[in-house]
Image: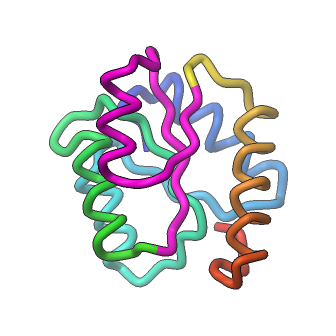
Amino acid sequence: MDDKKDVLQPLAEGLRVSGEFDVFTAENGRKALEIFKSGRKVDVLVTDIEMPVMDGFELLAQVKKDYPDTPAIVLTGHITHKIKEQLKAIGDFVCIQKPVSFWELRRKIIDELRIHSARGENKKTK
């Protein structure tokens, strides 16, 4: 999830076109939670931190509470000590500094799916 369509759309489209993933997009945290609440299976959450309406920290905290087995990858323009501490207070997340390439994001998603699959958690990519 990312509020900037110039970042969100190309990455989402690349993941869709790869044929490996079903991709749901949301421009803010509240819309992302609606996807979870709709019953759609979300195997990996990819989110930005800075978003309108509900930021990434709030989204991650809510997802961790309501969907604790869902791994998350955090995209941010600047990885600071403060951001790392805030994320650590919520849970354990992969953090990637933007700009991120399609290939790097794809590899991180696959890594997260493998890790969680090995733990017996999420089985199917979405």
Q: Is residue 78 above or below residue 39?
A: above
Residue 76, image x, y percentages: 46, 25
Residue 40, image x, y percentages: 48, 78
Q: From the image, which quarter does the C terminus lie in?
A: bottom right
Which quadrant of the structure image shows residue 118? bottom right
Which quadrant of the structure image shows residue 122? bottom right
Q: Which residues are the magenta region? A: 69-96
> Foreground: 113 or 11?
113
* Residue name at image x 37 percent, y 41 percent: 87
In the rendered picture of this protein, how many numbered marks are placed on residues? 0
* Residue name at image x 53 percent, y 70 percent: 42
* Residue name at image x 48 percent, y 52 percent: 92
* Residue name at image x 29 percent, y 53 percent: 59
Horizontally, residue 119 falls left or right of residue 6, namely: right
Which quadrant of the structure image shows residue 105? top right
Q: From the image, which quarter does the N terminus lie in?
A: top left
Residue 74, image x, y percentages: 49, 39
Q: Is residue 108 above or below residue 113?
A: above
